Image: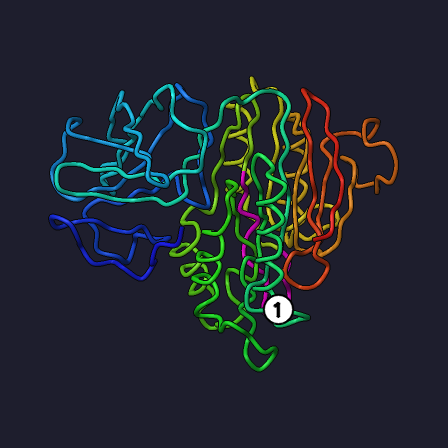
Amino acid sequence: MLISVLIIAAVISGAVILHRRSQDDVSYELVIRRPLISVPVIQEQGGQIEIIVRIQGETTDDDWEAALHGDEVIHDLIVTSSDKICDVHQEWLITCTIPQGTDGSLYDLRLSYGDAHSESIQSVAVVDEINHEFTFVHAADTHIGSTEGEGAVTYTRDFIDEMNRKRPDFIILTGDISDKMPPTWAEQDPPPEEQDMVFYELIQELEVPVYVVHGNHDYSYAEPDDPEQNIRSYQRWINPHLNYSFNYGDYHFVMQNSGKYAGFLDGDGMMTMDNVTWMEEELYNNMDKRMRFVAMHHPVYPDMIHDDTVRDAFREAVMDHDVAMVLAGHTHSSAVYDAQGSRVTGDMDTAQRPLHVTTGDVGQGSGEYRWIRIDGDEVEMTVHEI
């Protein structure tokens, strides 16, 4: 279902905002910050979901309404609590219960407070059961805008078609969503200023939940004099959150900001110690989960982090917090390393965790993705070609 992302006008009794990716430069009355199409929530019937919203004007903890909208189906959610979590941005945390009998599907979320409404498309997946056996796909480097081979848009659409056929439980996409190369370096189609919007339109064709984190190309190669310009575009169209985490049942996933590129000719990640500290806190607070995973764009094996001190702190943190796997892109090649950086070519069960995993690109010709099956504490991985 495609919904025009260019509409920011108010409709229907004054205030429906079709959610774009960033709200910082858009006038709004009410806007959903999470869940989003690129930061969805997956939950069972009868389970709870949390909605983070920003709202203008005076607000109380009453009068919130939420519903899931599918093809010719509406399921009203049961609002169980509402708490203000940030006075500066007027942010609220709304907790809702999914009623029993809700059909398993990927839904649009609609939230209202009085006459103000907001919609977050394809952001809530309702499933019959979440257990200790599931599959997810790791993919990276769609590079929308690249014209190599058949072009990144074609390759990405082929990937989406394959995911809709194979139906993993969810997808993790680790960065370089766009290409954003300077026009003097490479032909771009679509041009840099449209690439994030085109990706946003493409993933609306997905029938599988997808979690997205950014890469160095998403920050900007096209505007070296304003390296923040294109990360603002990424946040506007795709994902305003550069760091976030989510749970799939008893499994915790940290989506880590590995930083912008170190320089115009250096694509290594400028991860900061603040990012490592944030990750450590997320992992520490979820040590009761059965397994923990970290996903980001730049790998630490092979070393693609610019600051050695930060890189070493990251490596130590994921070991200390018993992370099972660190997923990364950037290298455009598929490889597995153990916790000490030794290449794993045989039995992964005997390799010291965390496993550091890179996966080939989707959008520039290799057409690779990694199918990952979790069964309790066991991990099986296979590389597939589209």
Colour mode of the rendering: rainbow
Element class at badge 1: loop
Q: Residue furthest right?
A: 346
Q: Position of residue 194 (x, y in %)?
A: 44, 68
Total number of numbered discs in the rendering: 1
Density class for disc 1 (Cα within 10 Å; few <14, some 14-19, many ≥20) is: some
The magenta segment is 255-268
Q: Residue furthest front?
A: 72
Compare residues 123 and 318 and report the one nearer the observer: 123
Left or right of 22, for residue 371: right
In the image, what residue occupies the spot 62% across and 28% down? 134
The answer to which quarter of the image holds residue 193 is: bottom left
Left or right: 96, with 308 as reference point: left
Residue located 16% across and 49% down the image: 15
For label 1, the residue is 151
Foreground pick, 69 / 383: 69
Magenta-colored stretch includes residue 191: no
Percent from the top left, x then y, of residue 33?
A: 34, 42
Q: Is residue 41 left or right of residue 65?
A: right
| Quadrant position of residue 317 | top right
| 236, above or below 55, in the image | below
Residue that protrudes farthest toward the bottom in the picture = 184
Q: Quadrant of residue 106?
A: top left
What amino acid does circle 1 point to?
Gly
Rendering coords of residue 161 (x, y %): 59, 51
Pick whichever, 384 or 179, lies toward us: 384
Q: Position of residue 66 (x, y in %)?
A: 26, 32
Judge left or right: residue 370 versus residue 115.
Answer: right
Q: Is residue 263 magenta?
A: yes
Compared with 279, 23 (above or below) is below
